[in-house]
Amino acid sequence: MAGADSIQSKVRDWKYRTGWTLSGLAILFLAMDAVMKLLALPVVIEAGTALGFGGESTARLLGVILMGCTVLYALPRTSLLGAILLTGYLGGAVATHVRVANPLFSHVLFGVYVGVFVWAGIYLRDPRLRILIPTR
């Protein structure tokens, strides 16, 4: 039986490390995006204007919201809440790109790609979520 426990332990470790790797990539990307918005960089203002959002104050507000959601996701105790809030934020991004008729795979679905990283990461690193949503 010791061999079976060892195999299960290795599987758990692999899932946990892979989950944190995916989550880490999502956290780094989202934190970078939030900082760019908080700094109201010219590229952010230009992109926001093209999407129908106005100015520095909107960029900074979006940056605060995104940073808050990302911090909640990064902290293990609040990661599930953070994932849910990030899903809403990313859904808004998808809807915005649909509204202005941006290209599907490069712009519209980009929020979906990030969302897959967010949820795959938390799914692999949190066994409680795997119990709640089993794969068969």
Image (cartoon, grey):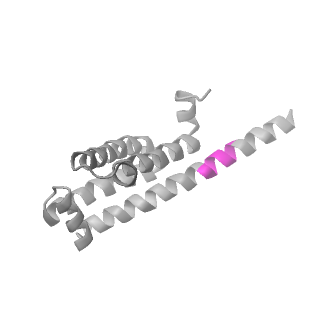
Query: In the shown orientation, is residue 128 left or right of residue 77?
Result: right
Q: Residue at x 68, y 47 (%)?
A: 13
- Secondary structure that dominates the magenta span: helix
Q: Residue at x 25, y 66 (%)?
A: 44
Residue 49 versus residue 76 in the image, above or below: below
Q: Residue at x 16, y 57 (%)?
A: 53
In percent of width and height, residue 67 lies at 33, 57
The residue nearer to you, when weighing 76 against 54, is: 54
Q: Is residue 17 magenta?
A: yes
Q: Is residue 13 magenta?
A: yes
Q: Residue at x 37, y 40 (%)?
A: 84
Query: In the shown orientation, is residue 52 left or right of residue 105?
Result: left
Q: Residue furthest bottom?
A: 42
Residue 25 versus residue 89 in the image, above or below: below
In percent of width and height, residue 42 lies at 22, 73
The residue nearer to you, when weighing 111 against 59, is: 111
Please identify the quadrant where the N terminus is shown.
top right
Query: In the shown orientation, is residue 36 left or right of residue 23?
Result: left
In percent of width and height, residue 90 lies at 33, 47
Q: How many marks?
A: 0
Res 112 quadrant in image:
top left
Residue 130 versus residue 20 in the image, above or below: above
Please identify the quadrant where the C terminus is shown.
top right
Res 66 quadrant in image:
bottom left
Residue 109 versus residue 58 in the image, above or below: above
In percent of width and height, residue 135 lies at 59, 29
Magenta-drawn segment? 12-18
